[in-house]
Image (cartoon, grey):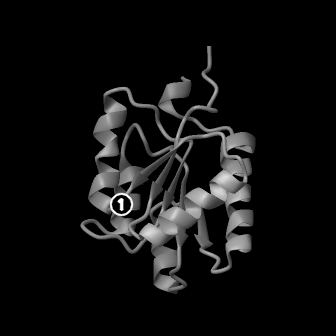
């Protein structure tokens, strides 16, 4: 029997306290049903591999900033997308970077979507709503917890 993904978390990988707060407020404003886990650098994000191996719920989607301390976001993306068990987790780059090289590398490494963070809070709320609707409701993921 397949498990429903309503309780699977969304993993937010973001080092900026302001952007973490903005994202959490945007999801709260839209009454997001999935819990949010926050990794504040690339190393902490990669530590979730061991947590998932130990039975922690796999996220329905990972929201990944690119400019991270310790391990760069593109390297985090590359590692997640090359992992035998977790490469099917959808990853959405949510960044302020408009650099074409970042965009090209992200897609080369297998990102599912690349979104430039809106500066305006109302626009950010709309982006959060669309992320939650698509990745938590409409999309049918293939993740280990569901098999």
Residue 120, relative to residue 45: is it above or below?
below
**Image check: 93 left or right of 46?**
right
Q: Quadrant of residue 123?
A: bottom right
Residue occupying the far left of the picture: 70
Where the N terminus falls, by quadrant? Answer: top right
The answer to which of 128 and 98 lies nearer the viewer is 128
In the rendered image, residue 9, in percent from the top left (x then y), is placed at 52, 40
The answer, for residue 112, to whether it is visible in the render is no
Q: Residue at x 55, y 35 (%)?
A: 8
Quadrant of the rendered image containing residue 124: bottom right
Q: Residue at x 68, y 38 (%)?
A: 140
- Give percent across and percent down for residue 117: 60, 74
Residue that appears at 33% across and 64% down = 75
Q: Is residue 78 visible?
A: yes
Q: Is residue 67 left or right of residue 89?
A: left
Q: Label 1 belongs to which residue?
A: 40
Name the residue located 50 percent from the left edge and 81 percent from the top edge. Answer: 97
**Residue 113: horizontal and vertical position, in percent?**
60, 62
Image quadrant containing the C terminus:
top right
Q: Secondary structure at mark 1?
A: loop
Circle 1 crowding by C-alpha within 10 Å: few under 14, some 14–19, many from 20: some
């Amino acid at each position: 029997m397949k498990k429903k993904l309503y309780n699977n978390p969304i993993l937010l990988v973001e080092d900026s306290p302001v952007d973490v707060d903005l994202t959490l407020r945007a999801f709260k404003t839209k009454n997001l049903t999935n819990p949010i886990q926050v990794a504040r650098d690339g190393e902490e994000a990669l530590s979730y591999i061991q947590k998932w191996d130990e039975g922690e719920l796999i996220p329905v989607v990972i929201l990944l900033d690119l400019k991270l301390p310790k391990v760069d976001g593109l390297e985090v993306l590359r590692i997640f997308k090359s992992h035998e068990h977790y490469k099917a987790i959808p990853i959405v780059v949510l960044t302020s970077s408009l650099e074409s090289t970042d965009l090209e590398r992200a897609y080369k490494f297998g990102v599912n979507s690349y979104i430039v963070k809106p500066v305006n809070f109302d626009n950010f709320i709309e982006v959060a709503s669309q992320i939650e609707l698509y990745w938590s409701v409409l999309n049918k993921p293939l993740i280990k917890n569901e098999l």
